Image (spheres, rainbow, N blue to C red):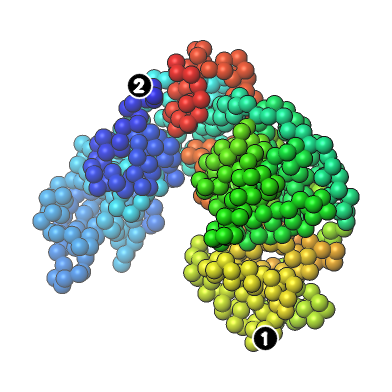
């Protein structure tokens, strides 16, 4: 139950003055449904109305607040012409201009012979000052309301600034006196304001500098939000760790056979990750581990070895992949590598139907099948295991925590290993996966050659095509990735089809095409023809971004590289350099380049280290866009900006752990205040893991 003290903040926004059903609906969708959502809707700018010159001194282009006497109304003689009102002070005359406004309304608003205060942007027209649609028209006695600094908020169509400002003010007035949940000595050292004072300050900026995320007030609120995040993750983690796991220890016989048959030695990073995993699986608590590996760092082998431990112990393992292309590829790779150990790998996707599907389900239910790879189809209710011991979730950012729970529920105390090939900055790893232990693979397997990355303007297209021709004639396979177009899959596909048609004129049937709107079977057919068959040049949208493995591919061309984020460019580049031949990545860009795009292309040329790239991506774009948080499963913060406030995380994380060590049920004085904090930032799910109190 949400604490009563917070009830006023979780009332509907329509309970605020000025927000009826129509405007309330706009605020719901743009900002959020509760009064509290307005507290986290931060100002984006200020308007300074303190500039109050005489008409003789007024400067064009500035917002001015002027005291004038109304001298004449000039209604338009022809429809659609502006309505003009003349006004003056002791030093000169000006025009107030209105479009589509009724004269009788203006006559009441600006009565002849009376003095009015007008505020808005001034321009000079035909030698005299002019103000079109003043922002304010007020009587002299209302001057105090107009002059000074005004806060600007991000708006949505149909909602005006005045209404939103009034609603935010009313929301601030509803904030009750809340107990201090912060770590007292830490807050004192930082010299930050108290929570309520910080809220008031952040919504009343006096200068541009006050909008910075680095101000003490904003940093204090970021601390509160991150503390709620880390405390919630620590509670979930404590709850999961309490659930009994089981001791899973294989005898190593299957793993030894597989390792002996590998054409390369495992890297130090892989051995360390396997030791971490073996330690977790051999303990009586459930394993919850994140395996972060850069593109081509050998996560799949680590996952297979972990799955073989479960099979050796008499149980089963499942690998959950986000797409059919990836599931089929994992199944093929694992089956090939596991063959020397005599272990068969089953595949279950939405495409397996009828008798084939029944046979797969029977194998899982009887225990005859030790390892299964699948898509969301594995999560369906009729999929039952004889004894599922380990679940591996690949590309975790494509799944939510929910899927992790569903697959874990298909067995008793199932150990969970989560994998991602998207290197995530350390700070974001903590905010998203703070409930997991983390292993990182940072080296590439032996024998992998470095990739040469070059950037070329689109004017060099002919030169690039000539280079691609030479590569294909020498036996190489080539990827050609088409530009990303404004989040529109339809336009992405059109761009790819156009490029495919162009390259087909040059290379005929040697060119294939894949994109996200193709049927699974058609995609597989083209991928197979590219991997082992007659297709040497694959034109594609970004569907090849994750996990596609064609060792013969040694060249990738990325068109309009300036439109891609760093992490995505790095993922795409990871499609090549998977064999023993040198590889080349060509970034084609359109001039002129923005400063950020230039930095991205420079970083791509300088390093292949995905973890360095992820940190740079965070610095260049801010956390909101890294991985495109909307679809990445990373939490979105309202106040904290991870590219600025990331260093707070360590302190907050340690604090959350310390609190739960001393007061696991949050029953002490600070514990009760922290419960309020969790509800305030809507981390209600975590509070359910506490005994009520």
Query: For mark 2, what is the residue?
Result: 4
> Quick check: 250 left or right of 446?
left
Instruction: Name above or below for residue 667 compared with residue 600.
Output: above
Q: Is residue 12 visible?
A: yes
Return the x and y of residue 253 as percentages of the image width and height. Answer: 84, 42
**Numbered circle sitting on residue 285:** none
Return the x and y of residue 46 as percentages of the image width and height. Answer: 41, 44
Between 619 and 559, the residue placed more toward the observer is: 559
**First of labels 2, 1 by sequence position:** 2
> Quick check: 303 left or right of 32?
right
Q: Nearer the viewer, mark 2 or mark 1?
A: 1
Q: Examine the image and state in which quarter residue 285 appears.
A: top right
Instruction: Name above or below for residue 573 compared with residue 614.
Output: below
Return the x and y of residue 499 as percentages of the image width and height. Answer: 60, 78
Indicate the secondary structure of the residue bearing disc 1: helix
Q: Residue at x 10, y 56 (%)?
A: 104
Between 230 and 308, the residue placed more toward the observer is: 308
Looking at the rendered image, the quarter that the N terminus falls into is top left
Q: Residue at x 35, y 21 (%)?
A: 4
The number of numbered discs placed on residues in the rendered structure image is 2
Q: Residue at x 81, y 77 (%)?
A: 475
Return the x and y of residue 671 as percentages of the image width and height. Answer: 51, 17
Query: For mark 1, what is the residue?
Result: 508
Q: Residue at x 84, y 58 (%)?
A: 448
Instruction: Name above or below for residue 135 compared with residue 125.
Output: above
């Amino acid at each position: 139950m949400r604490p009563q003290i917070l009830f006023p903040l979780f009332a509907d926004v329509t309970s605020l003055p000025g927000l009826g059903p129509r405007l309330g609906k706009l605020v719901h969708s743009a900002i959020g449904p509760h009064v509290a959502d307005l507290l986290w809707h931060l100002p984006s700018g200020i308007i300074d109305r303190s500039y109050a010159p005489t008409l003789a001194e007024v400067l064009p282009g500035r917002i001015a607040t002027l005291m004038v006497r109304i001298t004449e109304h000039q209604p338009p003689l022809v429809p659609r012409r502006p309505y003009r009102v003349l006004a003056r002070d002791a030093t000169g005359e000006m025009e107030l201009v209105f479009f589509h406004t009724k004269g009788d309304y203006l006559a009441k608003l600006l009565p002849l012979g009376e003095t009015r205060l007008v505020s808005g942007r001034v321009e000079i027209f035909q030698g005299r000052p002019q103000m079109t649609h003043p922002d304010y028209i007020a009587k002299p006695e209302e001057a105090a309301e107009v002059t000074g600094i005004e806060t600007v908020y991000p708006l949505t169509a149909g909602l005006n600034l005045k209404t939103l400002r009034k609603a935010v003010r009313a929301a601030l007035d509803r904030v009750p006196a809340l107990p201090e949940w912060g770590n007292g000595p830490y807050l004192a050292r930082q010299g930050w304001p108290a929570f309520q004072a910080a809220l008031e300050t952040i919504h009343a900026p006096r200068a541009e500098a006050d909008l910075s995320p680095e101000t003490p007030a904003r940093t204090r609120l970021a601390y509160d939000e991150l503390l709620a995040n880390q405390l919630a993750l620590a509670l979930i983690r404590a709850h999961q760790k309490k659930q009994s796991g089981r001791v899973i220890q294989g005898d190593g016989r299957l793993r030894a056979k597989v390792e002996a048959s590998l054409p390369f030695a495992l890297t130090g990073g892989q051995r360390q990750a396997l030791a971490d995993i073996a330690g977790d699986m051999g303990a009586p608590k459930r394993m919850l581990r994140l395996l972060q590996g850069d593109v081509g760092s050998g996560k799949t082998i680590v996952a297979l070895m972990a799955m073989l431990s479960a099979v050796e112990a008499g149980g089963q393992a499942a690998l959950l992949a986000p797409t059919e292309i990836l599931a089929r590829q994992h199944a093929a790779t694992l089956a090939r590598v596991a063959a020397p150990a005599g272990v068969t790998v089953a595949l279950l996707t939405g495409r397996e139907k009828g008798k084939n599907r029944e046979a797969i389900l029977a194998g899982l239910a009887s225990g005859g099948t030790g390892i299964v790879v699948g898509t969301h189809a594995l999560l369906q209710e009729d999929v039952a295991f004889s004894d599922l011991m380990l679940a591996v979730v690949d590309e975790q950012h494509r799944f939510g925590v929910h899927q992790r729970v569903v697959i874990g529920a298909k067995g008793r105390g199932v150990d969970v290993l989560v994998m991602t090939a998207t290197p995530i900055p350390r700070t974001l790893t903590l905010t998203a996966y703070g409930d997991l232990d983390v292993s990182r693979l940072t080296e590439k397997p032996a024998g992998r050659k470095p990739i040469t990355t070059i950037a070329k303007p689109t004017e060099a297209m002919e030169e690039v095509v000539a280079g691609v021709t030479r590569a294909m004639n020498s036996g190489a396979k080539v990827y050609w990735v088409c530009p990303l177009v404004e989040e529109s899959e339809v336009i992405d596909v059109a761009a790819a089809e156009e490029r495919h048609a162009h390259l087909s004129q040059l290379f005929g049937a040697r060119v294939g095409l894949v994109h996200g709107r193709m049927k699974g079977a058609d995609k597989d057919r083209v991928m197979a023809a590219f991997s082992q068959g007659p297709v040497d040049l694959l034109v594609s949208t970004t569907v090849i971004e994750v996990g596609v493995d064609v060792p013969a591919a040694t060249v990738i061309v990325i068109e309009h590289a300036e439109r891609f984020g760093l992490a995505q460019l790095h993922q795409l580049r990871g499609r090549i350099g998977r064999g023993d031949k040198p590889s080349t990545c060509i970034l084609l860009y359109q001039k002129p380049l923005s400063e950020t795009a230039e930095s991205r292309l420079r970083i791509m040329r300088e390093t292949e280290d995905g973890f360095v790239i992820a940190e740079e991506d965070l610095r260049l774009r801010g956390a909101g866009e890294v991985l495109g948080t909307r679809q990445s499963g990373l939490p979105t913060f309202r106040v904290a900006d991870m590219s600025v406030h990331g260093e707070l995380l360590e302190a907050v994380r340690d604090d959350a752990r310390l609190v739960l060590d001393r007061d696991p049920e949050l029953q002490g004085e600070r514990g009760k205040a922290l419960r309020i904090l969790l509800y305030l930032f809507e981390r209600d799910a975590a509070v359910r893991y506490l005994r009520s109190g």
